[in-house]
Image (cartoon, rainbow, N blue to C red):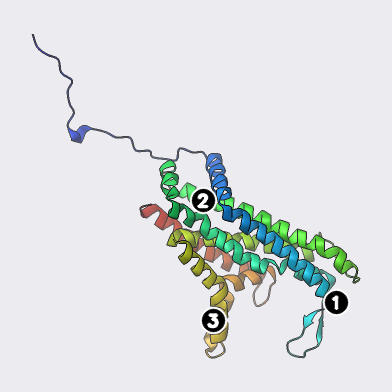
């Protein structure tokens, strides 16, 4: 009588299941990234701060502005006359200058926080292809920051209306001279957040990412502007800086708006392109 035994496969013949794609749909990824973004306490603080700062600065500037001037000519010292539409745009968007720095910090924290907490491992396990998770994070961050930027500039316009109206200044929100610059400011705010997300993914460090983004957006233009006084060719580089091109995108100066937008887009493509490459190749 023979004994039946279960054959044991050699180790080389054993197979294991390795997921080849994302277990989540696009909708699921977007929902997941939205939940993760709003699970950060910093998200509430930073986005609320953008709105509050924008409205506060709009109110202060509205009271400070006269009916005919928005400052003084740096060459003559005489008051500069501006149109009502320009006045409203200036009042409505000045607060976003600080808002840009705030969302830059949020952009870095939205990914560096996952690395510091170890949550990134769960994310990449659920999405083995990795890149869909990054693109979902980009879409969610862009969408929320653009919406907050739009709320900020439109809200600033509305709070400025009665104050400037008392000074015989009026403008329509739907005037293209008003609405397009407001829309451009909200768009650039969202672009900065996405650019910062790319930097945060590359460096995987909150401190390093924030320092790098603020250095590029805040410090680099100032340093090069000073150096251009001594080295002429540096002045040719300044228009291609990220924030300088962003300002040109909104208010054409040395270049057209579309040229400024393409330069800004190039910065973002490089940031996200390097981030995607490293995310795909590096261990979590």
The local crowd at label 1, few if under 14, some if 14 to 19, many if 20 or more residues have their Cα within 10 Å, is some
Residue 199 placement (x, y as % from top left): 48, 62
The residue at which mark 2 appears reads as: 135
Residue 26 placement (x, y as % from top left): 53, 41
Identify the residue at image location x=71%, y=61%: 52
The residue at which mark 1 appears reads as: 66
Which corner quadrant holds the N terminus? top left
Residue 184 placement (x, y as % from top left): 69, 63
Q: Is residue 18 above or below residue 238?
A: above
Identify the residue at image location x=82%, y=77%: 82
Q: Nearer the viewer, residue 44 or 90?
A: 44
* Dot in front, 2 or 1: 1
Q: Is residue 155 visible?
A: yes
Q: Is residue 129 visible?
A: no
The local crowd at label 2, few if under 14, some if 14 to 19, many if 20 or more residues have their Cα within 10 Å, is some
* Dot in front, 1 or 3: 1
Whether residue 46 sits left or right of residue 120 in the image: it is: right
Along the polypeptide, which appears first: circle 2 or circle 1?
A: 1
Identify the residue at image location x=54%, y=53%: 138
Whether residue 86 sits left or right of residue 206 in the image: it is: right
Seen as rendered, the residue at the extreme top is 1
Mark number displayed over residue 2:
none
Secondary structure of the residue carrying numbered label 3: helix
Along the polypeptide, which appears first: circle 3 or circle 2?
A: 2
Secondary structure of the residue carrying numbered label 1: loop
Mark number displayed over residue 223:
3
Q: Quadrant of residue 164?
A: bottom right
Label 2–label 1 contact, CB within 8 A: no
């Amino acid at each position: 009588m023979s004994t039946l035994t279960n054959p044991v496969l050699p180790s080389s013949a054993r197979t294991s299941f390795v997921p080849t794609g994302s277990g989540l749909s696009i909708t699921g990824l977007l929902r997941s990234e939205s939940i993760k973004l709003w699970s950060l306490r910093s998200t509430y603080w930073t986005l609320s701060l953008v709105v509050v700062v924008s409205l506060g600065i709009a109110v202060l500037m509205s009271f400070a502005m006269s009916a005919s001037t928005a400052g003084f000519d740096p060459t003559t010292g005489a008051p500069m006359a501006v149109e009502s539409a320009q006045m409203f745009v200036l009042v409505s968007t000045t607060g976003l200058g600080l808002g840009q720095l705030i969302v830059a910090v949020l952009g870095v924290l939205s990914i560096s926080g996952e690395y510091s907490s170890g949550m990134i491992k769960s994310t990449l396990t659920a999405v083995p292809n990795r890149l869909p998770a990054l693109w979902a994070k980009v879409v969610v961050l862009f969408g929320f920051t653009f919406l907050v930027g739009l709320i900020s500039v439109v809200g600033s316009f509305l709070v400025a209306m009665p104050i400037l109206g008392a000074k015989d200044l009026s403008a329509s929100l739907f005037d293209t001279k008003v609405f397009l610059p407001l829309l451009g400011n909200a768009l650039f705010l969202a672009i900065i957040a996405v650019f910062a997300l790319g930097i945060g993914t590359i460096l995987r460090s909150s401190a390093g990412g924030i320092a790098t983004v603020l250095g590029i957006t805040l410090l680099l233009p100032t340093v090069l502007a000073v150096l251009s006084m001594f080295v002429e060719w540096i002045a040719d580089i300044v228009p291609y800086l990220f924030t300088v091109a962003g300002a040109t995108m909104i208010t054409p100066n040395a270049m057209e708006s579309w040229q400024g937008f393409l330069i800004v887009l190039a910065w973002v493509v490089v940031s996200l392109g390097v981030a995607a490459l490293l995310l795909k190749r590096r261990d979590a």
